[in-house]
Image: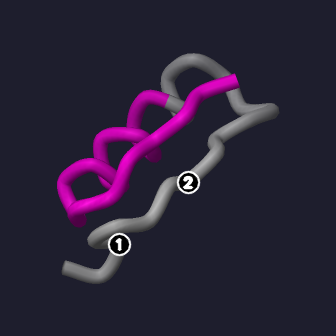
Amino acid sequence: MLLAGKTVVVSGVGAGLGHRVAETVVRDGGRAVLG
């Protein structure tokens, strides 16, 4: 898993794109924080 143990902050994107990015991060083993 590419993002295992990593936290990614997603900010400044629309609701649809932010959700997709967060889904991808979680699917790849990371944690997502949306702002």
Q: Label 1 is placed on what type of residue?
A: Leu
**Upstream in sequence: badge 2 or badge 1:** 1
Q: Residue 12: within the magenta?
A: no
How much space separates mark 2 and mark 1, taking CA atoms?
9 Å
Please rate how many residues cluster around mark 2, counting C-alpha atoms within 10 Å: few if below 14, some from 14 to 19, many from 20: some
Residue reaching furthest to the front: 5
Q: Secondary structure at mark 1?
A: loop
Q: Residue 20: within the magenta?
A: yes
> Do labels 2 and 1 touch, CB within 8 Å?
yes
Corner quadrant of residue 1? bottom left
- In the picture, the disc for residue 8 is 2
Q: Which span of residues is magenta-colored?
A: 19-35
Q: Would you say 23 lies left or right of 17 here?
A: left
Q: Label 2 is placed on what type of residue?
A: Val
- Which residue is labeled 1 in the image? 3
- In the picture, the disc for residue 27 is none
- Residue at x-position 41% and y-position 40%: 22
Q: Give the answer, above or below, for where 28 lies relative to 15.
A: below
User: Where's residue 25, x and y in %?
Assistant: 36, 55
Q: How has the structure been colored for display? A: one colour
Q: Secondary structure at mark 2?
A: strand
User: Where's residue 14, x and y in %?
Assistant: 67, 23
